[in-house]
Amino acid sequence: MPIPKKIINFLDKHDIGYEILEHKTVYTAFDAAQTMGKKLSEIAKTLAVKVDKKYVLVVVPASHKINFDKLKKLLKAKKITIVKEVDIKNIFKVKPGTLLPFGVFHKIPVFIDKTLLKSKVVIVSAGSYTQSLKLKAKDLIEHGAETLTIFSKAHKFKKQKITKPKKPVKKTVTKKKCARKPCKEKTTVRKKCVRKPKKKCVKKPIKKK
């Protein structure tokens, strides 16, 4: 996904010095810093914010997060919410993670946090997942910001531990020993056959008539 030509033309037209940085595919400012080996304070992240019923872009260092109380006071708004990635495509006609820090492309106001000036050079989104732009912070502010003030606060990132997939635990099936009851030997007692004595056949004499 190369950098759109309109961005290069815009930079050349305004004599803005820049350097194109090629890197692996990244979708967030945090991933960009990790991939390029840069400090989070050197990466400028662009966020879309809904202010009541309107939209604005805010640019803060990747090491910071928006202080909603300060931003609400600055914009004199009742309600402020960050636009979800799902809605970015429908509202701004770009893919999530490719918002540009120059309001001229999205036709909405851009508010840049003054904390970015601590880094003389910043890395910004170039509308690509594999390329970023490196330019001077003052050039970004001069050609991108409508308002420059402080509306962010430092954000502490927890170290992400690489979780290795757990190995499946083999269940050891222990076969229960079947305790067989000792077989009782059948003792066959033979009954004594008592023979009855045979009756003697006594022949009676036939009487003569």
Image (spheres, helix red, strand yellow):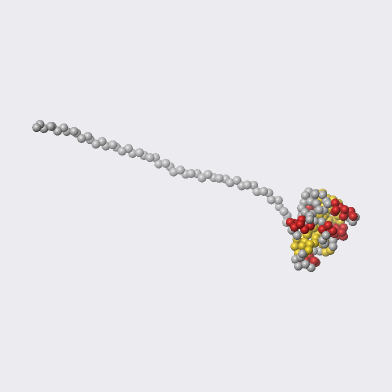
Classify residue 189 by image quadrant.
Answer: top left
Query: For the point 83% across and 60% down, which residue is it?
Result: 107
> Is residue 183 shown left or right of residue 81?
left
> Is residue 24 shown left or right of residue 9?
left
Of all residues, the one furthest to the left in this rendering is: 209
Q: Is residue 20 above or below residue 69?
A: above
* Percent position of residue 94, x then y: 79, 55
* Percent position of residue 81, x then y: 75, 62
Query: For the point 83% across and 57% down, which residue is it?
Result: 105
Query: For the point 55% across and 45% down, which residue is it?
Result: 173
Query: For the point 68% across and 49% down, which residue is it?
Result: 164
Residue 115 visible, this orientation = no
Which quadrant, please, contains the C terminus? top left
Classify residue 61 by image quadrant.
Answer: bottom right
* Percent position of residue 113, x then y: 82, 61
Residue 190 visible, this orientation = yes
* Percent position of residue 159, x then y: 73, 54
* Viewer-closest of 177 and 50: 50
* Viewer-closest of 98 and 202: 98
Number of numbered callouts drawn = 0
